[in-house]
Each structure stands twice: as C-alpha cells, then as structure tokens.
Image (tube, coloured by chain):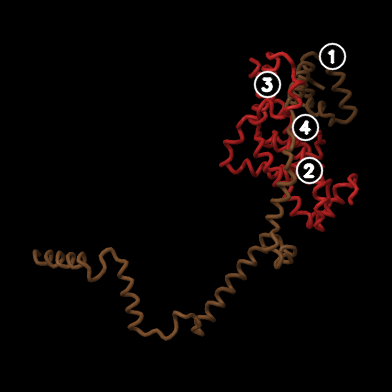
C-alpha cells in the first residue's frame, strides 16, 4: 500500500474498524514510514484533545421537571374522554379528527337553533324594533345625530353647496 | 418492584403500559449520555437540558408504538440526533448555537481542587478546551454528529450508520473529513 492509501485509512485504523489483516498492514507501515507516523500522531493528539471536553451532569430536578411536563401533556381533563382516539391513531390524525368533529357539530347545532328560532334575540322582532336598534348604534358615531356638532357639520355642508 | 438490571426493551414495554417507575429507571439510565450528546452537539447547556427532556418526552409518547427492532440505545440516539439536527434547522436559534461551551462547563464544585494547580496551566488548558469546543461547533452538522458518537460514545461505524440513517462507508468518510477539519483548524489555532 502507498502512503496516500494508508493515510486515507488512518481514521478507520484509529477507530479499530478495519479487518485484522489491514490493521496489521497499516501498523507495520507506520513503524517504517515517518511521514505517515507523523500524520497518525497528529490525529491521535486531536483525539486526545477532544477528551478534554468534560461531561456535564443533569440538573438534580431533571426527572421531576420531565415528569411534570409529561403530566401536563397527558392532562386527564383534556384526554380521558378521547384517549382511545389517540391510541388508535397518531396524535396529529386524532387532533384533526377532533377539530373536524367540533366544526361539524357547531355547524349542525347552529343551523338547528337558527331554524327553530330558539335564540332569544331572534324572537318576534318587528321591522321598527330592528330600525330603532340600528339607530341607537348611531350614538357611537363621532358626531351622533341631534348633537350640536352634527348640526354644525350639516350647516357647513349646505354652505359648501351654496358656493358651488 | 422492577429489577434495576432489567433490560431497556423490557422497561419500554412496562412504560407503554403506563408504569412510571419503569420510565424513571429508563430516564435515569440514559439521561447523562443523552444530555452530553446534545450538549456537545449544540454547545449550550440550558438548551441541551431542554432538548434532553424533549427526547424523553418522545420516548414516553412513542412507548406504546415502540417495537424493539434495534437496540434501545440506537433508537434513543436516533431520536436525539434527529432532534438536534431539526433544532439546527430552525434558524431562529442558530445564533445561540455558536455561543461558547464554557471551558469549565463540566467542572463541578468538588472538582475545583483537582484542577492543575498552576494558574498558567489552568489558563492554557481552558484556552485549549475553548478552541476545541469552538472548532467542534464549527464542523458541518453531519461530521460533528458522527465524530461525537464515535469519540464520546464509542459507537461502531455500523451503529452510527443506523443512528444517522446512512451507509457505513458514509460514516467512514464523514469521520475522515471531520478529523481532517479538526486537525487543520486546531493547527491554525496553535500558530
């Protein structure tokens, strides 16, 4: 094997991933070839240096926090009734099914209630009552009808008309 | 009471049936290596803690569907690896990733006394450690993950290939490039 071939295999050699025969061949080559040996020694030094990054330890409350998070996710108030749905299907499909069910139920109930005129504000309203309701909303205008401001604006607009 | 020597796959079975003690054993058995894997990859201690918890939440959620086709450790490493890689893709947090791994990141108060006594040696060691962590953080994601799995978890190429969902020869090539990159960058620091 030539030097460049050896150097391409040095990483696998260092990791002990070569077959015994190839491992021996490279080992023998390294004894004879100072350039390849230097390359390997540099690689070893970096490998040793990487060991200087120390380990960190989990915080003391690691499991407690985790357990709380899981309890929040598995909140029985939300899931007890529909747990079977989440066990049968993946969470995303089960959530989609619940949402679609909710929308359909809402539409159905809305239509039923509207047809039967069960809503209190829809019962026996005359046209004049509806008109009065709309007029009363005018009280929220910047210049409500009947105020001094509204009269002034009306007069001003007549004045502009007169100039034309 | 569950035997603490019981294997991971059995604990997963118990976890699937809602046994919290089995899950706790599983977490305590693997929390340190998962936390350190993420920490070395991400480079931020707080974020590593959050992501490690996320890994175990996924373990809990996946327990009913878990089928022991591979070793549990391979499976959980794969969960952690995917989470790390996805985290990197969400670029909003990217700036955090290059925040330093502090040179004394792993030092606990008890270890203070055992650090090299000379102040100069301490400074040099800290500087070297900072250089290494900085260099590690700047490796391309796949090279970094392969290197961490090999160097710190001593996994075989075959296991790394399973975790990273690639071929053994890809792992070998990732490691060759990672080592070469590290060497070049660290030599640059020495100059």
Q: CA distance from mark 1 to mark 4?
A: 31 Å
Which residue, given by chain and number where applicable, does mark 1 sit on? Answer: A32
Could you tell which of marks 4 and 3 lies nearer the N-terminus? 3
Q: Are marks 4 and 3 in contact (CB under 8 Å)?
A: no
* Mark 2 on the same chain as mark 4: yes
Which residue, given by chain and number where applicable, does mark 3 sit on? Answer: B126
Which residue, given by chain and number where applicable, does mark 2 sit on? Answer: B162
Could you tell which of marks 2 and 4 lies nearer the N-terminus? 4
Residue ID at (66%, 16%): B190
* The C terminus of chain A - image quarter: bottom left
Residue ID at (66%, 42%): B85
Would you identify the image quadrant in which residue A55 lies? top right
Q: Which is closer to the viewer, label 4 or label 3? A: 3
* Mark 2 on the same chain as mark 3: yes
Q: Nearer the viewer, residue B29 or A98?
A: B29
Q: CA distance from mark 3 to mark 1?
A: 36 Å
Would you identify the image quadrant in which residue B180 lies? top right
Bin the neighbour count of mark 3 within 10 Å (Cα to Cα): few under 14, some 14-19, many 20 and up: some
Which residue, given by chain and number where applicable, does mark 4 sit on? Answer: B152
Bin the neighbour count of mark 1 within 10 Å (Cα to Cα): few under 14, some 14-19, many 20 and up: few
Chain shown red: that is B
Chain for numbered disc 4: B
């Amino acid at each position: 094997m030539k030097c460049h071939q050896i150097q391409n295999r040095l990483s696998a050699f260092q990791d002990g991933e070569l077959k015994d025969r190839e491992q021996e061949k490279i080992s023998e080559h390294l004894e004879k070839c100072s350039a390849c040996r230097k390359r390997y020694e540099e690689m070893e030094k970096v490998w040793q240096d990487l060991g200087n990054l120390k380990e960190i330890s989990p915080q003391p409350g690691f499991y407690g926090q985790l357990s709380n998070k899981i309890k929040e996710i598995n909140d029985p108030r939300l899931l007890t009734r529909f747990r079977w749905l989440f066990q049968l299907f993946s969470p995303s499909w089960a959530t989609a099914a619940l949402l679609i069910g909710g929308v359909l139920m809402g539409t159905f109930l809305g239509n039923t209630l509207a047809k039967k005129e069960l809503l209190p504000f829809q019962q026996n309203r005359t046209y004049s009552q509806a008109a009065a309701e709309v007029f009363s909303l005018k009280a929220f205008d910047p210049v409500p009808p009947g105020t001094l401001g509204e009269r002034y604006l009306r007069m001003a607009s007549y004045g502009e008309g007169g100039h034309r | 009471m569950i035997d603490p020597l019981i294997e991971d796959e059995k604990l997963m079975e118990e976890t699937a049936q809602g046994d919290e003690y089995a899950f706790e054993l599983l977490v305590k058995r693997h929390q340190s290596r998962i936390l350190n894997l993420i920490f070395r990859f991400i480079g931020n201690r707080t974020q590593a803690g959050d992501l490690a918890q996320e890994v175990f939440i996924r373990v809990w959620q996946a327990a009913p569907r878990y089928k022991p086709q591979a070793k549990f450790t391979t499976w959980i490493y794969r969960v952690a690896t995917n989470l790390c890689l996805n985290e990197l893709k969400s670029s909003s947090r990217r700036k955090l990733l290059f925040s330093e791994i502090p040179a004394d990141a792993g030092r606990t108060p008890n270890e203070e006394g055992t650090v090299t006594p000379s102040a100069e040696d301490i400074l040099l060691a800290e500087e070297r450690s900072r250089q290494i962590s900085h260099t590690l953080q700047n490796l391309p994601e796949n090279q970094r993950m392969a290197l961490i799995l090999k160097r710190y978890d001593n996994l075989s190429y075959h296991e790394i290939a399973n975790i990273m969902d690639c071929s053994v020869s890809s792992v070998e090539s990732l490691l060759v490039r990672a080592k070469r990159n590290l060497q070049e960058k660290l030599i640059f620091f020495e100059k």
